[in-house]
Amino acid sequence: MTRVAAIDCGTNSIRLLVADADPETGELTDLDRRMTVVRLGQGVDRTGRLAPEALERTFAACREYAAVIERHGAERVRFVATSASRDAENRDDFVRGVVDILGVEPEVITGEEEAEFSFTGATKELTGRTDLHRPYLVVDIGGGSTEFVVGEEHVRAARSVDVGCVRMTERHLVVGGVVSDPPGEEQIAAMRADIEAALDLAEEKVPLREARTLVGLAGSVTTVSAIAQDLPAYDSTAIHHSRVSRARVREITEWLLRSTHAERAAVPSMHPGRVDVIAAGALVLLSIMERTGAEEVVVSEHDILDGIAFHTAAEAC
């Protein structure tokens, strides 16, 4: 077993996993898993730059994570940065800050690399399941981008497209600096058209409709599952490997799109950082299910973080 720390810094949140990993058996024993909404991608789609306040929120989370990593004595640390830092003109400021705090340089990975990690993390523990059929389509709906991966034991095809809950919210649901509460039909239609165009791009490279099992990752999907189960609080155990039908996803998405900020905030399983972006994330999920014909989505709490941990442990051997 190798003790590793994996950090995934996305557009909306930064997450940490400290775990003992056995790359031979695929066993991963969590020691600490946490998430902080920092909205690193705030305004990047519009300005092309990381905002100073977004950087400071992210660095504050990094300081907290550095203390956790030191306490657990991780042998190897890997920091992976995704969509927002790929897009930003001033990403060097981000890199320097992370190095100063954590002592490791963030890897600003490509969308294809991101997809590989996500697929590994989501499917490694599904081996041997007789109720889930291959090939899998793993979709990781992030803040700035969504990764699509089709494969059996290994990735066959992958593509990242620039639709995510934060990017779609900022592009279509913000008017005068304020999120529409709720959005109008024209705003929703424009967002839907943007998502459909991105699905067309994904489908040029990834055979979306060949998949027999849809596996959904990240906060938009897990939150939809929590709402579907009417959980009194966010419960990772109840959410992990839950299944949500397309009809239920549609019902939840339609409610989210016509709800107010206060109504969404009152959902007991809703993270405060997702209140304004969950409707866009749910619409991305629904659009994927409609495009692929998937009758249900299998929800996974294990995703890119777990994939980073597995790969890091394997490299240490």
Image (cartoon, rainbow, N blue to C red):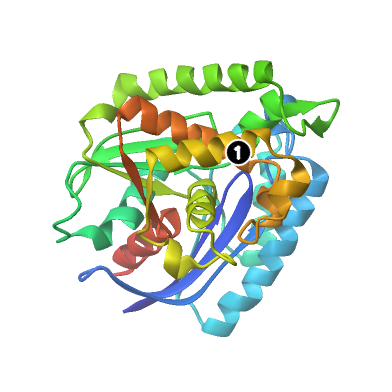
Query: Residue 87 versus residue 132: which sits nearer the camera?
Result: 132
Query: Residue 234 versus residue 25: which sits nearer the camera?
Result: 234
Identify the residue at image location x=43%, y=69%.
237
Query: Residue 18 versus residue 134: which sits nearer the camera?
Result: 134
Say which element carries label 1: helix
Total numbered labels placed on residues in the image: 1
Q: In which quarter of the image is the C terminus?
A: bottom left
User: Residue 85: x percent and y percent?
Assistant: 61, 40
Viewer can see residue 32: yes
Question: Would you identify the image quadrant in which residue 168 lies?
Answer: top right
Q: In this view, does 78 lie to the left or right of 89?
A: left
Query: Residue 231 versus residue 191: which sits nearer the camera?
Result: 231
Please say if 52 is above or below 186.
below
Identify the residue at image location x=43%, y=66%.
238
Q: Mark 1 points at which residue?
A: 255
Type of the residue with mark 1: Trp
- Disc 1 crowd rating (10 Å Cα; few below 14, some 14-19, many 20+) is some
Extreme right residue here? 176
Please say if 98 is above or below 293.
below
Identify the residue at image location x=19%, y=41%.
135
Q: Quadrant of the N terminus?
A: bottom left
Viewer can see residue 84: no
User: Residue 37: x percent and y percent?
Assistant: 67, 55
Identify the residue at image location x=48%, y=77%.
74
User: Residue 88: x percent and y percent?
Assistant: 66, 34
User: Residue 212: x percent and y percent?
Assistant: 21, 39
